Image: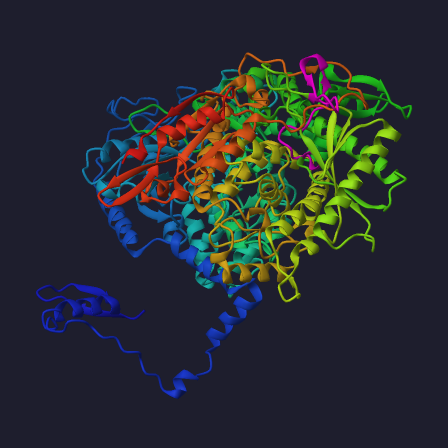
Amino acid sequence: MKKKKTVTEGQGEVKRVSDEDEAVVKAKRSKPEEAAVEELVYHPVKLSRSDLYKPPTAEELTQLKEAESLFHCSLLKMQMEELLKEVALSEHRKRQIDAFVETVTKLLQTLPESPAVEVSDVSWLSGAVKVPFLLVPETTKGKFHMAPPASVDLIGSYPLGTCTKPRVMVDLAVTIPADVLHPKDMLNQRYPRKRALYLAGLAQYLSTSSDIGTMRYSCLHGNRLRPVLLLTPPGKDSSSFTVRFHACPPPGFFKPSRFHPQRNNIRTEWYTGLQTPLGEPPTPLYNSSVLGDLLPRAHLQFLSAVSSQCSAFASGVALLKVWLRQRELDQGTGCFNGFLASMLMAYLLNTHRISNTMSPYQLLRNSLNFLASTDLTANGISLAKNADSTAPSLPEFHNAFQVVFVDPSGHLNMCADMSACTYKQLQHEASVSMQFWDNPTVDGFNSLLMTPKPMIRTSDHVFQLCELVKLQSSCKKLNLLNELMDHSGNYVHTALPYLLSLLQRGLGKRIHLLTHSLIPDPEWSVENEAPKYKSQPPLSFGLLLNPELAVSVLERGPSADSPKAAEFRQLWGSRSELRRFQDGAITEAVLWEGTNMCQKQLVPRQIVTHLLQLHADIPESCVRYVGAMVDDVIKTGSEESLLVVQSYDDLSRKLWQLEGLPLSITAVQGAHPALRYTQVFPPVPLKLDYSFFDREKTSRSLVPGEGKACPAYITPITVICHMEGSGKWPHDRLAIRHIRAAFHIRLGELLNKHHNYTCRPGPTHLDVWKNGLVFRITVAYHREPQVLRESVNAEGMLIVRDNEEAQALEMATIHKPLLTSTLHGLQQQQPCFGAVCRLAKRWLGAQLLSDDVTEDAADLLVASLFLQPAPFTPPGSPQVGFLRFLHLLSSFDWRNNPLIVNLNNQFTAADYTEIKNDFLASRESLPVMFIATPKDKKLSMWTKRAPSIQMLQRAMTLAAESLKVLEHQLMDGGQTQDVRVILRPPLDVYDVLIHLNHKQVPLLCQAVDPPTVNFGRGVMTGTVVPAGGALPVIDYNPVALYMAELRDAFGDLALFFCDPYGGTVIAVLWKPKAFISIPFKTSQVSARSVEVTGEEANTFPNVEAILEDFRVMGKDLVKSVEARTEKWSF
């Protein structure tokens, strides 16, 4: 934009005014003159023909080509441009920063000098300001005095133009005058202590100024040797940005060669009081901490030179910083911060891996590609072109540090405090991002830059070390005195690399990745002492599991005579023992406890606690493992589901082998959630206590006993049996039903004759009692839905018209079996899919939402998490899958996007585009929650009837709140640990609560908080009889039947909600429109009172009578009816 210079009258100062500002000024001046004009009329600008049809400029052509070749669509380009505008600092914010920096700089120039004192003497400081340093040991040599800084310079991201919101940090290098320091101050923490004293002196002086807001101390990336002073402006701008003071020595004050990674600058005798006969150990971390203070100005000059050659440099760095922030990798000790992001991009430009003409998008992409493919833990990189002869070599850096990235001077490893695990996590994240970047079926922008990835939602298992003070004894046991000295006593950072290495060895192939939380930079008031190391928050570790191997209970080691056997025994201690295997081999092995799937999922926990106790003296009580805390809600389930599937497979085989049927069977398909491992509480084989039941007179089937508790609920497991097509099938709908009923009778006779199964045929299905389970077989004829759609009109013409009956039959006999077999296949590939579905549906049931988000819809929502997990990897534990389900439900844009579930990977990129276009074109007529599958691209049959807009909104709100509460509880050990709190629904929004008699609730044991008193329900313990016996009471649930009656009778007046898994309360919500009085009609007087006013007679609901009807209809089931509000009286 062009700028114009205007001279303000009466003053000689020159201001910059933009064209827009000038237009505003003119508009303001002309307002009185145009008062007579009622309204401005805008006319379109008339363009000449040559302007209209002017060919695009070279720049426009480049942009069009770039959008076409680089982005899946131009939308992604626009999204990135908008994001860059969002994170960039506004001109107003920059003016505020510049003014505040200028104020502070002027203040520092008037800093008074103080007399010289010993470094250990802090009496010159007033009691209100403390030194930001842990003085261990207490004394060191040297003199110190305060003096005005030699210079104050802007460094870091702000002058470079890479500073981004929301956390605006402006760095100021305050140069300590040369006469305050001594050339030998790099020894024994003298320089770091003088640096801290200088910051304390600055804080004391600035505390008297009204131009400064709050002042706090912190540490640069958690390094206690590099404290910084944080200032904020006063007033309402205090939260808009922070100025960070770095006290630095004058450039070139210390020789860089003194800080070689193999040199020692902390003497053992000074630190421990003991003499060392073996020579001094190197102190690489301490050396890089001091050296880092010498180079910030040189680094800024280097980056500014690179940035000036590449116009998109600042934007590319901004995008990389956003990517890092979403993955929680940009802050804390050993992070990959914005400075490293800038240096990485500079390295890629210098080595010509990226060119100066690339767009920000290309810079980000190439940076991630480089991170994904380059292992800096094995092959470090260097920015130094002509390093001097005293600079260390890359192998020397690798000997001292885990990750190596050398700065332009050739002397400093900028990744000195980064652990190998953090870099591996960075590599993994970059690799995952690159995998879905080019996938046109993934929303790359949202996955890449907009979705946060907290550890609890990214890692399959998470555990925490709570009492960090125990790491002192770990350092002792691991014999880390030299390393502790190098870390200046920070036992947490000293022990961490060794603990990570130990866990990596122990967990081996069970995990794909081990990560750890980056300890946040401590912040404290200038009036307080520096916090102790033990006051840090717990250390969190994340495990990305390998599902096939993570649950193995056997750790098989080398053979007994192998040289590696001793190493194996040393790692596992007393748990290692010699075992003989079936192949005859005798090897070392470790066997972990694990009789069922729940215990096997926690084998990693046993490994972690054992290794930490054995090698690091960390007791099990200090390890808080939150890998499977939520799983307890659904108890077990995998073994029960497997029994059901095995029994079904056996029945399917027997049906195929049946002889004597008039038509052959063409397909046997399961159509029940238990057969795809997603039933919340799978059916359990039951042994019946016949004395508990009465008998039906004719069939001798069991019936519920009078006055007794409701018998155990027995779920019929639906099986669809397709018969072959034949000309013998009639074309009349009634005749087809009769034929199907005859097939049910014949199937029952054959199963009873050949296998002694107790069967009960009916017009719609055949119930088979087998292995303590009930299978409900429905015979299907493939042309029946078509017959239901056909009808003959008065003229005798055949009309084909779709109807609900045909759709319901197709759903039951075609779509549900297909969905069941597809999801069963997904379960075989992803072992924890079923458990995640069960957790999700248990939550939906507990929050009274299971009638709105049906079982099939919930299973598809969970399937989408496994089939399109971007930006994550597929869930490897039920808990992390459940957290992602809550996040998906609460944050997905249901209004503007279809949820596409790519079952069996059948969709192409073209299908995605077609579905989205069709969805947008018909949005108003489609379901609120739209789920597209390969067999259902346009209608979303699974969510056609529910949820409504209001219920989806409620589900989203509850999911967001549950996610927030659950994640907070899982990561905060200080909270009361009760994950079931998210399963207790808020009942205060409902108008009426119908409390049920526990005795008549058959699924009471499945309740969120099951009562201590249980009732006999006609079930015995012992071995289940595989065949024979009386037919039990099937599908008898008084609560579900009562709910159906309530909805049938009062569905026009109220909504009814209940937890299907042992809920003992039915919640009622009145429909607002139901209480509008309507004119009297004899056909509409059910449950209504009549009110006559003059000539008019109106009716309105008779609430008292309705509440009484609730009681009467639920006799013996309803305990009490509680009216919570009186909405109807208004």
Q: Residue furthest left?
A: 10
Q: Is 139 one of the magenta-colored residues?
A: no
Given residues 396 and 946, the one toward you in this image is 946
Residue occupying the point 27% across, 26% down: 129
Q: Residue furthest bottom?
A: 49
Given residues 682 and 1121, the one toward you in this image is 1121
**Relative side of 48 to 973, left or right:** left
- The quarter of the picture where residue 185 lies is top left
Residue 768 is situated, as x and y percent measured from the top left of the image, at: 76, 30
366 versus 68 height, above or below: above
Q: How is the image coloured?
A: rainbow
**Relative side of 766 to 626, left or right:** right
Given residues 458 and 152, the one toward you in this image is 458
- The quarter of the picture where residue 767 lies is top right
Residue occupying the point 10% across, 67% down: 9
Quadrant for the C terminus in the image: top left
Residue 387 is situated, as x and y percent measured from the top left of the image, at: 55, 50
- The quarter of the picture where residue 854 lies is top right
Quadrant for the N terminus in the image: bottom left
Q: Is 678 one of the magenta-colored residues?
A: yes
Magenta span of residues: 674-702
Given residues 236 and 48, the one toward you in this image is 48
Residue 627 is situated, as x and y percent measured from the top left of the image, at: 59, 28
Residue 419 visible in the shown view: yes
**Relative side of 866 to 950, left or right:** right
Give the main secondary structure, helix, strand or loop, of the magenta stretch: loop
Residue occupying the point 55% across, 24% down: 1062
1021 versus 523 height, above or below: above
Residue 167 is situated, as x and y percent measured from the top left of the image, at: 38, 44
**Relative side of 340 to 589, left or right:** left
